[in-house]
DNA sequence: GAAGATTGATGTCTCAATCTTC
DNA sequence: GAAGATTGAGACATCAATCTTC
C-alpha cells in the first residue's frame, strides 16, 4: 500500500527495503538457532512425556511454581514465565489441576485474581521428572555446545529474549526470569 | 520398570541419577535459549501474519521450496527441513495449495511419492514477504546479538541441531540444511 | 471503563491406522 | 513386509467475547 520503488535515501524502519540480503552469511546463525530449538525441544518433550507423562510446557510451569516464593504464582505471572497466552495458561492450569499437580487459590489482595499453587503431589512429580530432564539438557545441549561458547550464548540470547518483548502489549510482561526464587530441592513446605 | 533404587556406582546413562544440579549455572544459557526462541518466534510469526498472512512455518516451507533445485521437494524432505511430522506436512501443503502457493505433483521416479512444487504465485508471495521477515530477523536478532558471539552461536547451535537428531527414527532425516540450493532471487523459472 | 481470568470457536500439530506402491 | 503419503481422532494453542472486580 505504499513505498514507491524510487530509492529514498533514509526512511525510518521501512520493511519494504530489505536491510539484509537473503544470502547474508549471518543468517546461518539464525537458521542454526531455529533448527536447534525445533529438534531439541521435540526430543526433550518426548523424553519427558514417555518417562513422566509431562509435556515440556507442563514441566516448565511446575518448575516456575516450585521456584516461586510461596510455590504459587498469579495466572498472569505464570503465563509470562512459560510464555503462553492468558487463555493458554488457564487451560494448562486446568490440566495440571485435573491431575492434582496444582490447585487454584483466590488471590487475597485482589478478588479478580487467581493463583496457581503447586501441590505436594506436583512437587513430587516435578522432582521425579527433574533428573530425566536435566540429563536430557546435559546430554543434548550442555555437553554438545562448546564450553567456550556458553557465556556468549547466554549473554546474547538473553539480550535477544529481552529485546523481543520490548514493546509488547503488556509492559508488565517480560519480567526478569530470575528474582528471589526458592530452590526445587527445598523441603516441600 | 527397572533401576532398583539402590545406588550403583557406575551406570551407562542412567537418567535416574541427575548428572547436573538443578542450580547449575550453565542452565542459564539453556533458559536464555528457550526464552529467546519463544519470544522471538512469537514476534516474527506475528509480524509475518499481519503483514502477509503467512505463518512462520508457511514462510519457511515456501523458502525451502524456493531454494530447492527445481523449486520442488518430496513431502518427506520438506517435512524434514521445516521439522514437521509427515502428517503435519501433508496438512501444511494442503493449506498452501488451497491458497495457490504450491501445487502437488506426482514423483516421476516413485509412484508412491508426491512432490510439493512452488507456484509462481507462491514465489511472488515469498518475495513480497521476505523483506518483512529479513528485517525482523535483523532488528530482533542480528543487531541484538553481540557480533563476536555470532560465529560461536552458529557453530555450537549447529552442533546441537545435529546431535538432537542423531538416533532419530528416520536416519534419512536431519540432512544438512544447505546443499545445492537455488537463490530466492533467481528469475522465477 | 480497564484489568484479571475464563469460555467458545477455530486452527494446527501429533499419533495411530490406512492405502498405495515399492 | 517396508516405505511414502494421507486421513481420522484427539491434544493443545490462539483470538475474540464475556464475566467479575478494580
Image (cartoon, coloured by chain):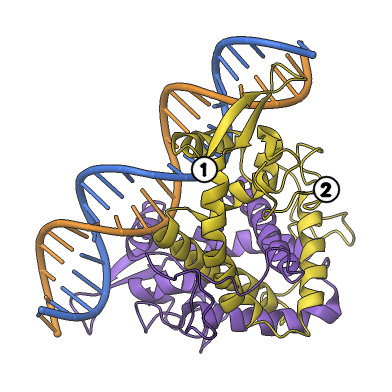
Chain colours: A purple, B yellow, C blue, D orange
Q: Nearer the viewer, mark 2 or mark 1?
A: 1
Q: Residue at x 65, y 40 (%)?
A: B79
Q: Is residue A183 visible?
A: yes
Number of numbered labels in the structure image: 2
Task: From this view, report whether residue A46 is shown above or below residue A68.
Answer: above
Residue occupied by mark 2: B180
Label 2 neighbourhood size at 10 Å, few (<14), some (14-19), many (20+)? few
Q: Residue at x 54, y 49 (%)?
A: B124
Q: Is residue A123 visible?
A: no
Report the side of A111 relative to A1 (left or right). Answer: left
Element marked by disc 2:
loop
Label 1 neighbourhood size at 10 Å, few (<14), some (14-19), many (20+)? few
Q: Residue at x 51, y 50 (%)?
A: B125
Element marked by disc 1:
helix
At which x and y percent is residue A138?
A: 77, 66
Q: Which mark is residue B121?
A: 1
At which x and y percent is residue B83?
A: 65, 47
At which x and y percent is residue A52?
A: 59, 51
- Chain of the residue displaying label 1: B
Report the side of A56 relative to A43 (left or right). Answer: left
- Chain of the residue displaying label 2: B
Task: From this view, report whether residue B94 is shown above or below residue B111.
Answer: below
Sequence-wise first label, 2 or 1? 1
Asked which quadrant contains residue B34, the reply is: bottom right
Q: Are marks 2 and 1 on the same chain?
A: yes
Asked whether B103 or A28 is in front, the reply is B103
At which x and y percent is residue B93?
A: 54, 36
| Name of the residue lying farthest toward the bottom | A180
Asked whether B31 or B23 is in front, the reply is B31
Amino acid at each position: 500500500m505504499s513505498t514507491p520503488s524510487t530509492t529514498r535515501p533514509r526512511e525510518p524502519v521501512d520493511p519494504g527495503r530489505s536491510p539484509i540480503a537473503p544470502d547474508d552469511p549471518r543468517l546461518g546463525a539464525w537458521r542454526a538457532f531455529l533448527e536447534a530449538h525445533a529438534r531439541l525441544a521435540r526430543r526433550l518433550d518426548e523424553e519427558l512425556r514417555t518417562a513422566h507423562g509431562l509435556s515440556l510446557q507442563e514441566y516448565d510451569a511446575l518448575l516456575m511454581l516450585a521456584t516461586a516464593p510461596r510455590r504459587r504464582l498469579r495466572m498472569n505471572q505464570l503465563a509470562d514465565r512459560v510464555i503462553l497466552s492468558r487463555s493458554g495458561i488457564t487451560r494448562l492450569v486446568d490440566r495440571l489441576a485435573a491431575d492434582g499437580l496444582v490447585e487454584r487459590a483466590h488471590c487475597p489482595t485482589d478478588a479478580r485474581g487467581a493463583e496457581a499453587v503447586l501441590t505436594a503431589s506436583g512437587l513430587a512429580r516435578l522432582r521425579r521428572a527433574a533428573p530425566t530432564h536435566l540429563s536430557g539438557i546435559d546430554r543434548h545441549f550442555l555437553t554438545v555446545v562448546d564450553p567456550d561458547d556458553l557465556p556468549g550464548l547466554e549473554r546474547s540470547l538473553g539480550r535477544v529474549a529481552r529485546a523481543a518483548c520490548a514493546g509488547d502489549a503488556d509492559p508488565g510482561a517480560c519480567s526478569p526470569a530470575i528474582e528471589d526464587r526458592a530452590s526445587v530441592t527445598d523441603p516441600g513446605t
